[in-house]
Image (spheres, rainbow, N blue to C red):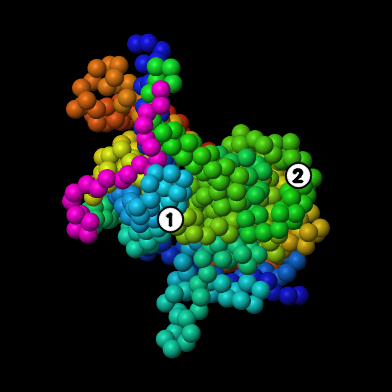
Amino acid sequence: MGIAEFFQHLMNGLTLGGIYALIALGYTMVYGILKFINFAHGDVLMVGAYIGLFLFDWLRGDSPLGLWTLVAFFLAMIVSMGFSAAIGMFIERVAYKPLRKATRLAPLLSAIGVSFILSNGAAWAFGTHSRKFNYPFDNSAIHLGGVVITPHQILILVVSLVIMIILKIFVDKTRMGKAMRATSLDQGTAMLMGISVNRVISMTFAIGSALAAVGGILIALDFKVYATMGTMMGLKAFVAAVVGGIGNISGAMFGGILLGILETFGVAVFGIPTGLKDTIAFGVLILILLLKPEGLFGKVEKEKV
Amino acid sequence: MKELLSIDDISVSYGNIKALQQVSMHVNEGDIVCLIGANGSGKSTLLKAIVGQEPLVSGSITFDGEEICRARNEVVKGVKRPRILTTDLIAAKGIALVPEGRRVFADMTVEENLDMGAFLVRDEQLIADRKEAMYDFFPILGARRRQKTRSLSGGEQQMMAIARALMSGPRLILLDEPGLGLAPLVIADIFEKIDMINKQDKVTVFLVEQNARMALKASTEGYVMENGKIVLHDASASLLENEKVREAYLGE
């Protein structure tokens, strides 16, 4: 494998991984606070992609590719983030919050129910055919040395990087971000500080769902929009969150990117048949669960008395 | 003297086990009041009930003239339903609990822990001033402000938990076994700080301790709890002389 080929695969892996990371963040943040896997997260991604698609097509109208289409794309993305955040908060309020004191299995089952409602609802409302999400720019490949990069890949890298940096600053530096970390460390004590745990939970779902919408729109450009698009993407992002150490924000970012690179290199370099590409993620999941169940960045739960 | 905290006839149950039975207590503004009792007598349950972390089966709790907790089944029909405050809203009234076992946010730095203590304070300058005051008051915390709290010793963590509680500028601070598991010298240091908090910052202190001698010496008034019931209440100085207390709690 030449250097150019290596960088080609790395680029492809990084872009795929950036999207996994965006989605994995939603799983990991919710888990960090509620110790619960939101299996409807992938379907929120799908809803976000539909909203983005409709908005973009409406805003764009008949305009040819140009500055306006790019502006329209980002406008559609931001509005979709807002809607998805509201949907995420609504789902939490209706389907999870009443079950907070129930057994741990109850909200999990409720999440699987929400997942089916969303994907079936979308299939009913928008049809089962997949819709094309047109590129808001000319996506012809750019040749850099021997490496072929598409503007779409650059978009993915820039957007996911910017979002992850903003999220990291939010969580590390701001009052509400710190409150979120405190809540995930110790809910009871966080309440003693005057932190409204309900507000923190709502906020967590809002942020996670907004990030899922971005991930959904970014992959939709390549893979189209359809009712079950969130299922496999969601599962893989979940694997990424577990690999990084579920509950750990940096871990989810790292796990997502690692998974993207492993999938790309697995097919391209290690000769795993393309048809088996999806098995890589789950193979990695099993390996991690066997060898380091707490994930690469996770901590073994231990209380110092 | 003004009554700040009033606990009226409260009971708390865990299933069939009665953790607290018709407990009544009063804390006057500016005092240091202690509650002593053996392990498992219900002391921590009482503190949790005050901050709304244990539902009451009967009775009510009033802070500064305002009812903050009431048993749900005592809500009379037709009467406007009294608000049962959640823990975060009780904290906002000016009650800070330093919980048993300190419960520091171990993965956050000392400074971030103090920031969390000041979560309800919206004035950045005031937060910065209070942090500086805490670093003066507990110099070891200033030295370790950027360290993760998990790297602190037990005594340092206890000081941090107290500093964190003070960051909100509370009117009443509840301390749950501040001396638990610490060396005698460290305990003496912490009790000295508690006295200063009361005398200098005029914060009312309600202290729960197994270490009866330390607690009674530090306080003005004391309650003795046995099996979820208050069995004695007197001035701390008198309790130190009390035959029963000497025998059961002071090991004399």
Horizontal side of B38 relative to A117 (left or right) equals: right
- Residue A6 location (% of width, % of height): 38, 16
Residue B127 sits inside the magenta stretch: no
Amino acid at the residue labelled 1: Val
* Residue for point 55% across, 57% down: A195
Q: Is residue A2 above or below residue B236?
A: above
Q: Amino acid at mark 2?
A: Tyr
Q: Is residue B10 above or below residue A165?
A: below
| Residue B47 pos. (x, y %) | 57, 61
Residue at the outermost bottom position:
B78
Q: Nearer the viewer, residue A141 or B101?
A: A141
Residue bearing mark 2: B135
Query: Is circle 1 on the same chain as circle 2?
Result: no
Magenta region includes residue A137: yes
Residue A215, quarter of the rendered image: top left
* Magenta-highlighted residues: A123-143
